[in-house]
Amino acid sequence: MKKFIGLTMIILLISSCDIQQKKEAKLPEVEVDIDTEAGQLPTFDVDWANVNVGTKTRTVSIPKVVVVMEEEEVEVPYIDVDMPNSGDKEELTLRVEAEVDGKEHTIDIKEIIATGNNLYVVSKLEEKEQSLGDKKLRISDQIILNAPDLNVKHIILGEKPNRVFNDEYKYVKDINSFKSELKNAKVIFTK
């Protein structure tokens, strides 16, 4: 049985390729005085499966490294807001962040505008000259607010960086046209 399987395997291996002999075997000629002429081994052309190697574009998930922010003690603006008939106040950290690449950027909270129960945190995103190379960087600014529970909306003056992280804020090119749409607005903080 083992011989049959072995013979079958050899037959399958040989039958899966096309072998054509290109040259005949020639044995060396031997003279009695030990002079020899070089022999020649047979050569074969073997047709095997055609293999094409290339690339195809596919969308795959690739882990990316994001620069982690380090904590430091710094002075941050503190705003205490008293509203009539507002009740209890709560201390909140209003933080604006952006993830950038290409060049360094700064982001600064410039003012806070109150209208009704809404607070609009207006920030400015500016591109600097220093290149980041292929790195990505998260930048932020923050203010501490002691106020009643209000709806906080972030408006960023500047061009929105092409990063998914930046989708949670509204980016505008002209802050004055945005402000003109606000009714009964009062600036409660300016930097």
Image (tube, rainbow, N blue to C red):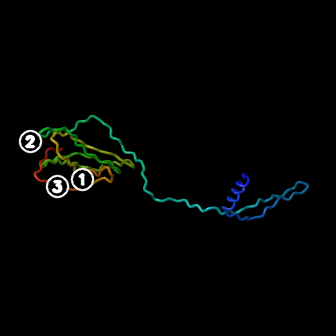
Which residue matches tag 1?
170
**Disc 2 and disc 1: Cα gap in Å?**
30 Å
Front position among marks 2 and 1: 2
| Mark 3 or mark 1, earlier in chain | 1
Circles 2 and 1, Cβ within 8 Å, touching? The answer is no
Q: In the image, is residue 108 above or below residue 182? A: above
Dividing the picture into quadrants, the one containing residue 7 is bottom right
Write the residue at 18% across / 48% down. 120
Dividing the picture into quadrants, the one containing residue 174 is bottom left
- Apparent side of residue 93 relative to residue 129 in the rendered image (left or right): left
Judged from the image, the secondary structure of the residue bearing numbered disc 3 is: helix
Q: In the image, is residue 3 above or below residue 23? A: above
Write the residue at 91% across / 55% down. 32
Which residue matches tag 3?
176
Q: Quadrant of the C terminus?
A: top left
Q: Which residue lies most toward the front here? A: 1
Question: Is 97 in front, or is 191?
Answer: 97
- Give, as a three-letter code, the residue at label 1: Lys
Front position among marks 3 and 1: 1
